[in-house]
Amino acid sequence: MPGIGPYFKYISASLIAIVGARHGLRWSLVTAAALNALVGFTFGPGELLNCLFLVTPIALMLPARQRTGRDVEGGEGEADASGRTHGVSGARWWAMLLATYAIAYPARLGVMGMLMGVEISAIVRSMASASYQAFERFWTLAHLPADIAVSGAVEWMWIILPLIGVGYGFMLYLVNRPAYRGGLMILKRTRLG
């Protein structure tokens, strides 16, 4: 299917989460390891790092989220496909998710830098330069020259990188939540039948 490849890696987290909800954390870890190995062998170390540090955390954390009264009538926790109720309450789960991604994204860049033999600041400088070129009109309207924007990004990278990670975590949750819930509904229907 042309065009779906780049998006599949983001949605694949919901497949791992469905396996985890149905069969537990151990099978979820095995599925994640198999997916990461497949991605690493097929697409190389760059995509492997994306899968390890960006896709796997949300895949392992989705089954741990306990739905609240707004999501489930009566405020009971979400029952997975096997009938077990498990999970972490909303605020604690969100704190865990966002903290995980605040650490995972900079760690991904650190490992990438180690593999390439460069410092994180060089990667951030490259990313900031590409971002400046992509949004050049905005930066021109803000009267901010490229060298100041790039050096500012490098100087503030220990704040910027965790914030980007938090954004990734939120985006991956929004992308995977509907597929995960849909998968659980299908499992529940097939289990009853």
Image (tube, rainbow, N blue to C red):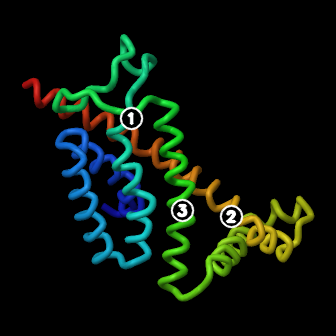
Earlier sequence position, callout 2 versus callout 3: 3
Image side of residue 96 versus residue 42, left or right: right
Q: x%, y% of residue 105?
A: 54, 62
Is label 1 in a helix, a strand or a loop? Answer: loop
Quadrant assignment for the N terminus: bottom left
User: Which residue lies at the image location 45% right of the left edge and 18% below the top edge?
Assistant: 70
**Label 1 Cα crowd, 10 Å radius (few <14 / some 14-19 / many 20+):** some
User: Which residue lies at the image location 39% right of the left edge and 26% below the top edge?
Assistant: 67
Q: For the residues labelled 2 and 3, say whether their Cβ atoms are less than 8 Å apart.
A: no
In this rendered view, identify the residue nearer to me: 175 or 157.
Answer: 157
User: Which residue lies at the image location 89% right of the left edge and 60% below the top edge?
Assistant: 141
Q: Read off the residue under disc 1.
A: 65
**Label 2 Cα crowd, 10 Å radius (few <14 / some 14-19 / many 20+):** few
Image side of residue 7 versus residue 118, left or right: left
Look at the picture and state if 102 lies above or below 154: above
Q: Please, what is the three-letter code of the amino acid marked with disc 1?
A: Arg
Q: For the residues labelled 3 and 1, say whether their Cβ atoms are less than 8 Å apart.
A: no
* Corner quadrant of residue 136: bottom right
Q: Please, what is the three-letter code of the amino acid marked with disc 3?
A: Tyr
Disc number lying in front (2 or 3): 2
Q: x%, y% of residue 169?
A: 51, 49
Q: Read off the residue under disc 2.
A: 158
Image side of residue 89 versus residue 16, left or right: right
Image side of residue 75 versus residue 140, left or right: left
User: How many labels, in total?
Assistant: 3
Q: x%, y% of residue 151?
A: 80, 74
Q: Read off the residue under disc 3.
A: 105
